[in-house]
Image (spheres, rainbow, N blue to C red):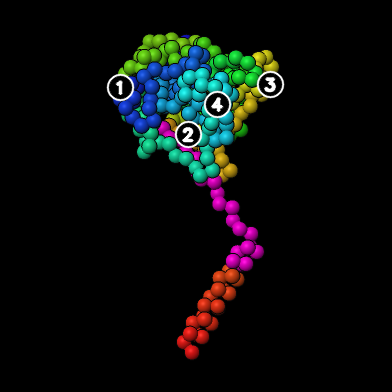
Amino acid sequence: MKLKFKLAAVAAALATLAGGAHADLSTGSTNNNGNLALLAFNTVTFDWYVRDLGFLMNTFLPTGITTSVADNNAGVNSGVGAVGDKSPEAGLLLNGSNAANFSDPSFASWLGTQTAANVKWMVGAYDAQSVSSTQNSRRLIASSTRSNEDFTNAQLDAFSSTGLWGSLGTLANPFTLSKTGVLLNTAALTGFQSGVGLADVGQSANLFYAVRSSFTGNTALLANTTAYGNSGGLATVLLNADGEFSYSLAPAAVVPLPPALWLMGAGLVAVGGMVRRRRAAALAA
């Protein structure tokens, strides 16, 4: 399938914004720690929009995830695994208020040239490197409208390959105001063969991190998938028609005390009040 690819982002402006967007989209096939990017496309005309969200894959991992030592933390093979922090129990909100590059007015201009009902979007990042079973393996981050997304090892291989999401770094470099007329062979209508549920503009989606469950082979087996969320529920990502993109995770719900403990607490308060009244009466006598 030939898809027309359009880039709509301003590198010089993005680079100055909070969150630190990149002038080039780092590719997971060479850096093994690719950029988190947002893509929208028209399912009929195959016209494209892409935005660098300003995070490398290893800086946007679920809380509790620690990568293998060779998974290229901070863009260098430092020998230290990256530790996730984007789904804490306290909740997290990343949007235009604290990561300004999440907002892009040029998206509204691009959307105005499309039939909005035909536009779908998703978020993703990938790591195509597989050195050894003890060092690293292929990985992805992907949004989906499904709340129980599963990925197979084969889908991770496909998503990170040249011709699918792995082509974005090549097509989008260097970041300029726009790029048109670039053709891409891919299966975008099935989420670049990742099988994700693509979202409509204004529709929220969940976010997932997946790692190949074996270093090589076993393509039919399920990858190890973690949903972004905490004990209170799943995180959501949302792209609005004005170009505002948000990541939201509510604080975990407070666990209520059992009724017996409430009664015990009320009793202690009552006893304390009675003691204070008796002491005050004795002093007044």
Q: Earlier in the sequence, mark 4 or mark 2?
A: 4
Q: Residues within 10 Å of mark 3 (few under 14, many from 20)?
A: some
Looking at the rendered structure, the secondary structure element under dot 4 is loop
Mark 1: amino acid? Ala
Within 10 angstroms of label 4, few (less than 14), some, or many (20 or more) residues? many
Q: Do the residues bearing badges 3 and 2 touch, measured as CB atoms within 8 Å?
A: no
Q: Element under label 1? A: helix
Q: Which mark is residue 81?
A: 4
Which secondary structure lies at badge 2? strand
Q: Nearer the viewer, mark 4 or mark 3?
A: 4
Percent x, y for residue 234?
Answer: 55, 38
The answer to whether residue 261 is left or right of residue 12 is: right
Within-10-Å neighbours for mark 2: few <14, some 14–19, many 20+:
many
Front residue of this view, candidates 160 and 145 = 160
Q: Earlier in the sequence, mark 3 or mark 2?
A: 3
Q: Which mark is residue 215?
A: none
Query: Magenta stretch?
Result: 245-265
Q: Are marks 4 and 1 in contact (CB under 8 Å)?
A: no
Residue identifier under label 2:
237
Magenta residue check for 259: yes
Measure how far apart labels 3 and 2 are at the Cα level: 27 Å
Residue denoted by label 3? 221
Q: Position of residue 22 (x, y in %)?
A: 38, 22
Residue in the image at 59% along x and 15% along y: 130
Q: Residue at x 42, y 18 (%)?
A: 25
Q: Nearer the viewer, residue 274 or 194?
A: 274
Of badges 1 and 2, the one in the foreground is 1
